[in-house]
């Protein structure tokens, strides 16, 4: 599961319904075009062909999940292509795993996100098992009023080369109130005066705004979200799903 950005959880049914209609239309159009090219039907036969597809889907609804997964994959590829390489360019120091890794995983996260915190063991295991994995952290401070403050301090920690320690301390704390943020900063060994100055720099705010822009462009509506290769995985999907996506990206 994922904590929401702007789209309510109740919209998931409408999303699936919309995808089903898109699948139906796409399959009907494909079948009609194949038949038309073969000379089997005329333009007026499209409605009849779509009815055949409609009736088949009602009889065999089990094919819809696979079709919708493929449709989502194609949409993800289009969205990612529209952003290009910018998505994979980390804020200096906001990286986990191997900074020179050949495979890149982009993680949209919020220190106040319960599901992000629950995903930490999976992420740690994934990094340990994949020495060629580079994890680019993109803070999406959307959950709590203090999320932006915590995210800004995370980027300040990144500038001091101590992002990983601060990241672990924040999720271990489980809160993003000012006291927890300062305690995590001290535990990570930050120069607090320097970090406080860095956290309010325009480039930090620009980074957080850019992350929100990426999320909107990609249709991301909550955290955590994982992007690797041409796949977008939303929610606390677990290590196995992430490992499979990483392995697929490595082969491509």
Image (cartoon, rainbow, N blue to C red):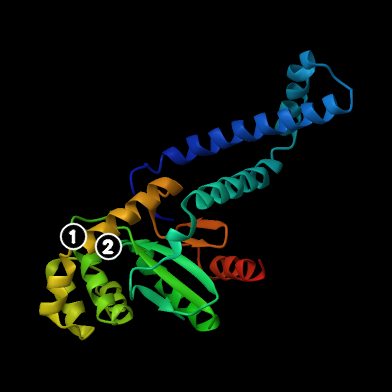
Q: Residue at x 75, y 32 (%)?
A: 30
Whole-percent x, y for residue 89 in the image: 41, 66
Residue at 29%, 60% in the rendered image? 207
Question: Furthest-left residue in view?
Answer: 193
For the residue pair 60 and 27, the one nearer the viewer reads as 27
The spot of residue 168 in percent (x, y) is 31, 78
Helix or strand or loop: what does disc 2 sit on?
A: loop
Q: Is residue 141 visible?
A: no
Residue at x 43% of width, y 38% of height: 11
Judging by the rendered image, the residue that carries numbered circle 1 is 146
Q: Residue at x 61, y 47 (%)?
A: 74
Looking at the figure, which quarter contains the N terminus? Answer: bottom left
In this rendering, is residue 186 above or below 240?
below
Within 10 angstroms of label 2, few (less than 14), some, or many (20 or more) residues? many
Q: Position of residue 67 (x, y in %)?
A: 67, 43
Residue at which label 2 appears: 112
- Residue 198 sits in quarter: bottom left
Q: Closer to the camera, 164 or 241?
A: 164
Horizontal side, residue 205 vs residue 211: left or right: left
Whether label 2 touches label 1, CB < 8 Å:
yes
Q: Is 63 located above or below residue 169 in the figure? A: above
Residue 171, x across and y down, in percent: 30, 72
């Amino acid at each position: 599961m994922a904590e929401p950005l702007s789209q309510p959880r109740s919209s998931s049914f409408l999303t699936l319904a919309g995808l089903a209609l898109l699948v139906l239309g796409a399959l009907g159009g494909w079948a009609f075009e194949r038949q038309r090219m073969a000379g089997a039907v005329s333009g007026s036969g499209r409605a009849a062909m779509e009815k055949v597809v409609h009736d088949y889907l009602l009889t065999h609804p089990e094919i819809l999940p696979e079709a919708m997964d493929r449709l989502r994959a194609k949409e993800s590829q289009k969205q990612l292509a529209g952003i290009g390489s910018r998505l994979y360019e980390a804020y200096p120091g906001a990286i986990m795993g191997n900074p020179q890794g050949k495979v890149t995983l982009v993680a949209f996260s919020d220190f106040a996100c319960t599901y992000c915190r629950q995903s930490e063991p999976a992420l740690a295991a994934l990094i340990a098992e994949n020495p060629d994995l580079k994890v680019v952290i993109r803070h999406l401070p959307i959950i709590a009023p203090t999320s932006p403050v915590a995210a800004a301090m995370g980027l300040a920690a990144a500038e001091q080369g101590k992002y990983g320690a601060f990241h672990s301390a924040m999720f271990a704390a489980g809160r993003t109130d000012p006291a927890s943020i300062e305690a995590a900063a001290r535990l990570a060994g930050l120069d607090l005066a320097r970090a406080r100055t860095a956290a309010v720099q325009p480039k930090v705010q620009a980074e957080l705004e850019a992350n929100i822009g990426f999320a909107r462009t990609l249709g991301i509506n909550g955290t955590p979200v994982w992007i690797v290769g041409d796949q977008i995985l939303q929610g606390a999907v677990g290590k196995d799903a992430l490992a499979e996506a990483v392995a697929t990206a490595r082969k491509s």
